[in-house]
Amino acid sequence: MKTKRHRRRRKLKPIAYVLMGLIILLLVAIGFAFKTLLFSNPANNDISDSNATVVSPSSSMVPTTPTPQISIQPTPTYDTTTPSSITVIANKKHSIGQYAPSDLIAVSHPGSNGTQYMRQEAAEAMESLLSAADNDGVTLYTQSGYRSYDTQVSLWQSYADRDGAAAADTYSSRAGYSDHQTGLAMDIMGINTRMNASTRSDCPIEQCEGSDASLWLAQHAADYGFIQRFPVDKQDITGYVDEWWHYRYVGVELAQDIKESGLCMEEYFNVEGGDYAQSAQ
């Protein structure tokens, strides 16, 4: 008969008890540390205490880098269609109708050809220009300033009767399309260049363009707010032959910019020019 063997329980060695104790202590320590971390974090206070208040960090506590502000300057816009605008363009494509300025005053300067009128701002600037020329020893005369719609009707017709309509259109505007009707334009002559600008009979154009008057105006007119309205080699754009004597007021800053650009008004303001539309023929 077989005898049953009883298995003998192995006794743990003392070192095993030590290791188990250490593991238990380690687990307790980890648990305590986790509990401390959990309840000391303000973001979790609302979990353990429904009445706790979560405090967000203030801007003084958290350093921030300011966003740089980029200043974008708008592209200037100019009113080239309202007849009373300083920058209005009257040309063969843009009529100002029967507009008549309400602020015309006489340009005061000795020796001018009759009494010439301009809008007040332009007239005062013109007087400053004429005085500056006097101080530089250059004598200038104003010959033709503001022209009314009715005046332009008769003036253009007289040229057309003499030279034909096609020829008249190269140097004179039809009523409603004239730069002079804005009250911002003036024909300026020198002491040896006073003439009938349409016939050029008293002064060949090549001589006039080299005169002291023309040279002084080309150099200084923009400083007083005036530009040469019909520059050389721009006839296809302006619609008129070049006229060194015809100056137009636009204001000092704008006049200097246009002069520096080398552009005529139509080019600078991106406004259509050239000949009359068929409906105006």
Image: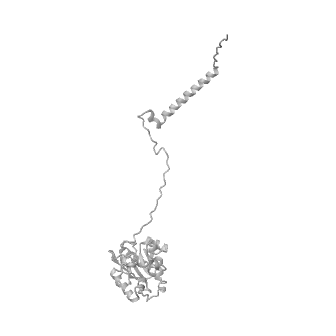
In the rendering, at what x and y percent does residue 152 appear?
35, 82
- Quadrant holding the C terminus: bottom left
Residue 5, compared with residue 244, is above or below; it is above
Examine the rendering and report whether any part of residue 261 can be seen: yes
Instruction: Say left or right for 22 vs 166.
Output: right
- Residue farthest along the top direction in this orientation: 1
In the rendering, at what x and y percent does residue 127 appear?
39, 77
Residue 64, compared with residue 232, is above or below; it is above
**Residue at x-position 49% and y-position 72%:** 261
**Residue at x-position 50% and y-position 32%:** 36
Where, by quadrant of the figure, is residue 189 drawn? bottom left
Choose between 216 and 240: the one closer to the eye.
240
**Residue at x-position 57% and y-position 28%:** 26
| Display coloring | one colour
In the rendering, at what x and y percent does residue 241 appear?
45, 82
Where, by quadrant of the figure, is residue 20 drawn? top right
Choose between 38 and 201: the one closer to the eye.
38
Instruction: Say left or right for 28 vs 241.
Output: right
- Residue farthest along the front direction in this orientation: 1
Q: How many numbered dots are placed on residues in this image?
A: 0
- Quadrant holding the N terminus: top right
Choose between 233 and 101: the one closer to the eye.
233
Examine the rendering and report whether any part of residue 197 can be seen: no
Residue 54, compared with residue 102, is above or below; it is above
Choose between 109 and 2: the one closer to the eye.
2
In the rendering, at what x and y percent does residue 16 appear?
63, 22
Instruction: Say left or right for 82 vs 10.
Output: left
